[in-house]
Every structure is written in C-alpha cells, then in structure tokens.
C-alpha cells in the first residue's frame, strides 16, 4: 500500500511550525487515513484525537514513521495539545 502523499505536507507543516498541536494534523489529513494505518476505527481515532495522551508508544512510532519525523516531535505535539487545555482545577 502506498503512503498517502499528504504525510509529506504534514511533515513540512510540523517542521515550519504551522502545526503545533496533534489535532492540527487532521486539518490536512482525514482521520480515516491515519485510522486505517493504525488499524483503528474512526470512532476510536476521534477519541485519540481528543485525548492523544491515550496513544500507545507503538502508535506514536508508527505516526512518526508515516510523517517521516522523529517520534519526539509527535510527543511534543501531544504535550503542546495537553498543555493548551483549560485547567480543570478550581
């Protein structure tokens, strides 16, 4: 199976800092494309987009291979996403 060409665009956008959070990947790549690569159904992929901290390390490695960037860059996107959430503490 050929890798979707949009992964190259995602790589460029991450490297140029236009994508700074994990969920922004899916502004350019349908979640169904990555869901298929991760062997997830679209409902579970939606859950992972909403809560990327639930991604398994192996899934982070697969995503980094698809995008052709170091897995730490994916971890940074996930951490940025988590830190941007409103605090639930009162």
Image (cartoon, rainbow, N blue to C red):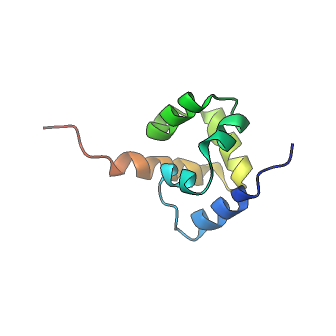
Q: Quadrant of the C terminus?
A: top left
Q: Position of residue 26 (x, y in %)?
A: 56, 51
The outermost residue toward the right is 1
Picture mark count = 0
User: What residue is shown at x 56% (from left), y 34% (from top)?
Assistant: 45
Specify the quadrant of the image occupied by residue 14: bottom right
User: What residue is shown at x 72% (from left), y 38% (from top)?
Assistant: 37
The outermost residue toward the left is 90
User: Compared with residue 10, is residue 47 higher up or lower down, i.e. above or below?
Assistant: above
Q: Position of residue 32 (x, y in %)?
A: 64, 40
User: What residue is shown at x 39% (from left), y 45% (from top)?
Assistant: 82
Nearest to the observer: residue 74 or residue 43:
43
Nearest to the observer: residue 80 or residue 31:
31
User: What residue is shown at x 50% (from left), y 40% (from top)?
Assistant: 49
Specify the quadrant of the image occupied by residue 36: top right
The reply, left or right, for residue 4 in relation to residue 42 is: right
Q: Quadrant of the N terminus?
A: top right
Nearest to the observer: residue 48 or residue 31:
31
The reply, left or right, for residue 50 in relation to residue 27 is: left
User: Compared with residue 76, is residue 48 higher up or lower down, i.e. above or below?
Assistant: above
Q: Position of residue 20 (x, y in %)?
A: 48, 60
Q: Position of residue 6 (x, y in %)?
A: 70, 58
């Amino acid at each position: 199976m050929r890798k979707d060409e949009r992964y190259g665009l995602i790589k460029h956008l991450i490297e140029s800092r236009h994508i700074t959070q994990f969920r922004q990947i899916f502004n350019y790549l349908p979640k169904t494309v990555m869901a298929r690569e991760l062997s997830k159904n679209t409902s579970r992929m939606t859950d992972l987009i909403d809560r990327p901290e639930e991604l398994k390390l192996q899934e982070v490695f697969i995503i980094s291979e698809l995008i052709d960037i170091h897995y730490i860059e994916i971890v940074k996107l996930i951490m940025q996403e988590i830190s941007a959430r409103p605090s639930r503490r009162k």
